[in-house]
Image (cartoon, grey):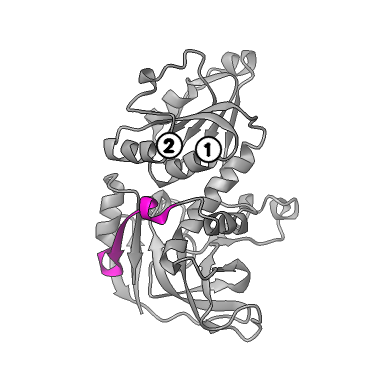
């Protein structure tokens, strides 16, 4: 089969690899579409994945074409979205229900072969069947949505009527915007240096959109500030925008080397909370339900649908900040 392969830091190509074979409790999925995200860029630069080469792609959906000998829950022809999370279920963090912090954390498309391919293998327990009204390739959006749902689980102390500021209006920032509108925010402001992405945030109904938080009128700061960029400068600026008693959520994936400075006295004196949200935790099925209910409009969120042969081009577009969610289709 054809697959995108990251063979070494900075090197990606579409090559022919062996077809996957399912284990007893696994299925093989014919991939309809696979989304790109910041994690793929990190893998390309040699971060996250413990070993290379690897077939990337942790945001994907498709049709079951083969099942393992012990699979009874799914059959060939079923359309599914795939949760890429792979946990050991044995370590301390798995035993206390914090599986996303698993000491042996792994993920399809990060540490094992993923969905940037014609076929991918997944545990049956990671597959969610799609309702008839959902287009299979659009369901690649469920995985990033599940990460956003996890982010709002972290912010569960958010009260009705809060003011929210989001840095970044790429796919993840826009998803956080959509969820903020549904979790009681009195207003959601968005900051981005990309005018096209800001235009999309306005289309989705943000309260205000600007190239800098200085352009927004919140002298006392915001109750909740979310970084969805992973950019060091944006993170540093965002930390200074949290109002008294507020919360800063590090949601974007930063480079390993990124650094930001905090003011311990201000954290203490103003009772500011700084927290993070790591990937997916008990949120994939809920994201699938939200997606089926129409919380996202795929035609707004998906800007590009490219053939798998153009995977390197798709990564280049993503790195350049072009479009919103970019999908590749085998």
The answer to which quarter of the image holds residue 195 is top left
In the rendered structure, the answer to whether residue 96 lies left or right of residue 72 reads: right
The residue to which callout 2 is attached is 205
Res 54 visible: no
Residue at the farthest bottom position: 69
Is 242 situated above or below 192? above
Q: Are marks 2 and 1 in contact (CB under 8 Å)?
A: yes
Where disc 1 sits, the SS reads helix
The label on residue 181 is 1
Question: Of residues 92 and 23, which is closer to you in this image?
Answer: 23
In the rendered structure, the answer to whether residue 167 lies left or right of residue 322 reads: right
In the picture, the quarter occupied by the C terminus is bottom left
Question: Of residues 84 and 135, which is closer to you in this image?
Answer: 135
The answer to which quarter of the image holds residue 292 is bottom right
The label on residue 147 is none
The answer to which quarter of the image holds residue 293 is bottom right
In the picture, the quarter occupied by the N terminus is bottom left
Residue name at image x 61 percent, y 15 percent: 270
- Please provide the residue range marked out in magenta: 297-310
Question: Of residues 185 and 266, which is closer to you in this image?
Answer: 185
């Amino acid at each position: 089969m054809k697959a995108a392969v990251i063979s070494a830091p900075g090197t990606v190509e579409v090559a022919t690899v062996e077809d996957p074979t399912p284990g007893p409790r696994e299925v093989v999925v014919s991939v309809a579409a696979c989304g790109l995200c910041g994690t793929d860029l990190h893998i390309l630069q040699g971060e996250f994945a413990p070993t290379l080469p690897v077939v990337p792609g942790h945001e994907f959906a498709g049709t079951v074409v083969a099942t393992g000998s012990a699979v009874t829950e799914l059959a060939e022809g079923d359309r599914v979205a795939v949760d890429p999370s792979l946990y050991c279920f044995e370590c301390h963090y798995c035993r206390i229900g914090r599986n996303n912090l698993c000491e042996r954390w792994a993920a399809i498309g990060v540490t094992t072969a993923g969905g940037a391919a014609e076929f991918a293998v997944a545990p049956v327990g990671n597959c969610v069947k799609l309702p008839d009204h959902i287009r299979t390739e659009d369901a690649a959006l469920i995985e990033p949505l599940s990460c956003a749902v996890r982010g709002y689980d972290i912010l569960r102390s958010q009260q009705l009527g809060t003011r929210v500021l989001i840095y970044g209006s790429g796919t993840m920032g826009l998803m956080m915007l959509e969820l903020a509108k549904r979790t009681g925010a009195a207003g959601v402001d968005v900051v981005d240096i990309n005018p096209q992405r800001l235009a999309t945030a306005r289309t989705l109904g943000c309260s205000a959109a600007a190239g800098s938080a200085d352009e927004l009128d919140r002298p006392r700061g915001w109750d909740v500030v979310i970084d969805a960029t992973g950019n060091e400068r944006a993170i540093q600026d965002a930390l200074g925008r949290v109002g008294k008693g507020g919360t800063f959520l590090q949601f974007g994936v930063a480079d390993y080397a990124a650094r930001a400075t905090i003011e311990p006295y201000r954290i203490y004196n103003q009772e500011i909370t700084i927290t993070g949200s790591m990937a997916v935790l008990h949120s994939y099925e809920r994201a699938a339900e939200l997606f089926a209910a129409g919380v996202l409009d795929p035609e707004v969120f998906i800007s590009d649908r490219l053939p798998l042969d153009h995977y390197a081009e798709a990564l280049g577009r993503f790195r350049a900040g072009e479009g919103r969610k970019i999908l590749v289709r085998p």
